[in-house]
Amino acid sequence: MMDYLRSTFSPESRIDSDAAFEEIKTSPLLILDDLGQERDTNWVEERLYQIIVHRQNFRLPTVVTTRTDFANEAKNGSAVASRIQDSGSGQIVTLNAPDYRLAL
């Protein structure tokens, strides 16, 4: 998602970056797969924060899958991790399972 959004800012892009960002923020259901594995830049952190805050404020369903320890990230000052850890706006379900890709 972040790569797609970043690509809309390219001069060659025919996609309106503001419209793409708005579509992501307001989609009826947003699934952020493997969150925390994207390149950690100020731009990414800011956009993710805006998305998470908007979706929490408007109570839009968001599913996050991750291998990142967001409790630890929140302690280290990540605003995105802090928002994700907010039990008032969601539920964290921990699944402990082996990596199926390693079994192939």
Image: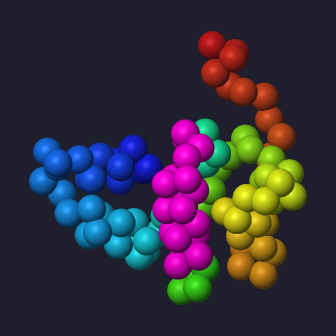
Give the residue displayed 76% in from the left and 66% down from the top.
Answer: 82
Q: Specify whether 100 is left or right of 4.
A: right
Point out the stretch of residues depicted in magenta.
38-54
Residue placed most toward the observer, 30 or 11: 11
Give the residue displayed 43% in from the left and 71% down from the top.
Answer: 25
Q: Position of residue 24 (x, y in %)?
A: 39, 66
- Camera sees residue 58: yes
Q: Position of residue 73 (x, y in %)?
A: 79, 52
Q: Is the image coloured rainbow, by chain, by secondary structure, or in one colour?
A: rainbow
Does the magenta run of residues contain 42? yes
Give the residue displayed 74% in from the left and 44% down from the top.
Answer: 68
- Camera sees residue 23: no
Q: Specify whether 101 is left or right of 86.
A: left
Does the magenta run of residues contain 53? yes
Most extreme residue toward the top, as rendered?
Answer: 104
Main SS class of the magenta portion in the image:
helix
In the rendered view, would you say 92 is above or below 38? below
Residue placed most toward the observer, 102 or 34: 34
Most extreme residue toward the front, as rendered?
Answer: 42
| Among the 4 quarters of the image, the one containing residue 48 | bottom right
In the rendered view, would you say 17 is above or below 11? below
Q: Specify whether 4 is left or right of 14.
A: right
Q: Position of residue 50 (x, y in %)?
A: 52, 71
Q: Position of residue 49 (x, y in %)?
A: 58, 66
Residue placed most toward the observer, 8 or 42: 42
